[in-house]
Amino acid sequence: MKLDTKKALNLLLCIAIFSITLNSCKDKVKEEKITEIDPFDTADEIISKIKKLEFPDNTINIVDLGAIADGKTLNTQAIKKAIDSCNKSGGGKVIIPSGNFLTGPIVLKSNVNLHLEEGANVLFTTDKSAYLPAVHTSYEAVELMNYSPLIYAYKQNNIAVTGKGTFNGQADRENWWPWCGAERYGHIEGTPKQKDDHNLPRLRTMNENATPVAERTFGEGHQLRPLFFQPFECDNVLIQGVTFTNAPFWVLHPIKCNYVRVDGVTVSSHGPNNDGCDPEYSKYVHITNCTFDTGDDCIAIKSGRNEEGRRINIPSENIVVENCDMKDGHGGVVMGSEISAGVRNVYVRNCKMDSPNLDRAIRIKTNTLRGGFVENVYVKNIHVGQVKEAVLKINTYYGIYANQEGDFIPSIKNIHLEDIEVENGGKYGILIKGRAENPVKNVTLTNVHIKGAKTDLSIENSEPLVFKNTTINGKQY
């Protein structure tokens, strides 16, 4: 059968159009496969959801309510009156001017911005009775009734601490620190300490037994140190510009909070358990432009200890850390060890981590009592001058020496490091100790260059790491 010329030309034209369309679709699919979503676009979205706080144009100076800046007069009531009055009038700014102001605990209220002017030095009294009666707080990720945090907010909204002044907790080898039980922090053998049966062991048992928080009474007669600044179940929290020093225990501890910004804060405190910032059970947290020089982890993201974390079951998530300077500390950005409810969606970028007394840059720590999960951690553009142990450490045997074995196998996956430059990597470049029952999964290193590590890699119970343009001690991986 013969086709006339016109039909033949039409057929060839249809074939040509079909071929062009097919190739175009193939190219489009290919382009879509190549195009990858930048995870830090998600970080920017998280930041955008933490709104800028606004306060009414109303100011109260604590001096106008009788505060005296001599470093000796107790100003607790003057500060309380100022905050309460500001709150009742609809909110505004409470000003602490230049000078040395001694006080007991400060309790923040909704719609109040506590503002420290340059030269303001807030000294917290060493009289432990000032921090009573006991309040609903926490200790090492277990809730209890204990000494009030030095700065405390409970179930408040739209609160801020801002300015250029300093909060001095006045903890030292004679005040608060000796209770940790270590001689280097002033503990004298034979005197009470936090590990005594009536302290931590009692609290641990209450955790296991799900004892109601109201019945977990500590405080006077016990040796569990107070937190420095704890917003508890608060939304819309700003901590900006101020300095914290000489902390009794953890420094900044937003627990069960949403929409928190920590901006331009300096934490310089080298006492026991002096973590810099510990978001716990918290969502939408932005930590930026801060300096951490600490006695423990610079930033430690947490989500409850053991049974309590599993009961509460609020993961910490959507957390961005950027433009920060980490100096001394057990870790730069850390997840754990109290992590039983899990942590996910953590973004770290544009930070400097450098000190002969900084143990690790990025650290994940848990065990089979804690369990929990860590997933979707993205770290980019980090300069590490020097660390002691490892650039990245993932440890699922944390605290094994203290009988920390249980039935809750941790899950750790999707950990991504990119554009990391390390001058002195310490003992290990990368150190991972996973569990055979559930190995660490999907760890990638892209454009990571580590110098000076004594051992390149130490990997146990992990899927093979994915390396892209990565060198350790000059060796291409």
Image (spheres, rainbow, N blue to C red):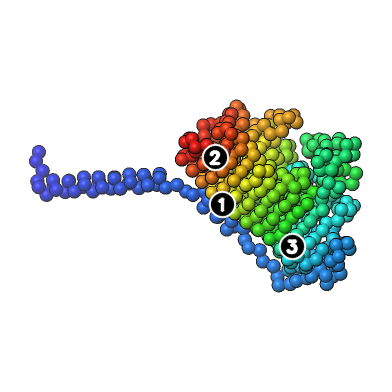
- Graded by Cα atoms within 10 Å as few (under 14), some (14 to 19) or many (20 or more), the crowding at tag 1 reads some
First in sequence, mark 1 or 3: give its number: 3
- Image position of 424 with respect to 276: above or below: above
Contact (Cβ within 8 Å) of mark 1 with mark 3: no
- Graded by Cα atoms within 10 Å as few (under 14), some (14 to 19) or many (20 or more), the crowding at tag 3 reads many
SS at badge 3: loop
Instruction: Name the spot of residue 343 as percent of width and height, x first.
Output: 63, 43
Q: Residue at x 36, y 44 (%)?
A: 30
Quote the CA–CA distance across marks 1 and 3.
26 Å
Q: Residue at x 90, y 44 (%)?
A: 221
Instruction: Name the spot of residue 279 as percent of width and height, x first.
Output: 68, 49
Q: Residue at x 90, y 36 (%)?
A: 190
Q: Is residue 380 left or right of residue 120?
A: left
First in sequence, mark 1 or 2: give its number: 1
Instruction: Name the spot of residue 223 as percent of width and height, x first.
Output: 86, 43
Image mark for residue 350: 1
Furthest toward the top, the residue is 436
Residue at the spot of label 2: 451
Amino acid type of the residue tagged 2 in the rendering: Lys
Quote the CA–CA distance across marks 2 and 3.
39 Å
Amino acid type of the residue tagged 1 in the rendering: Asn
Say which of 364 and 306 sits in front.
Answer: 364
Residue at the spot of label 3: 165
Q: From the viewer's perspective, is the residue at label 2 or at label 3 nearer?
A: 2
Q: From the viewer's perspective, is the residue at label 1 or at label 2 nearer?
A: 2
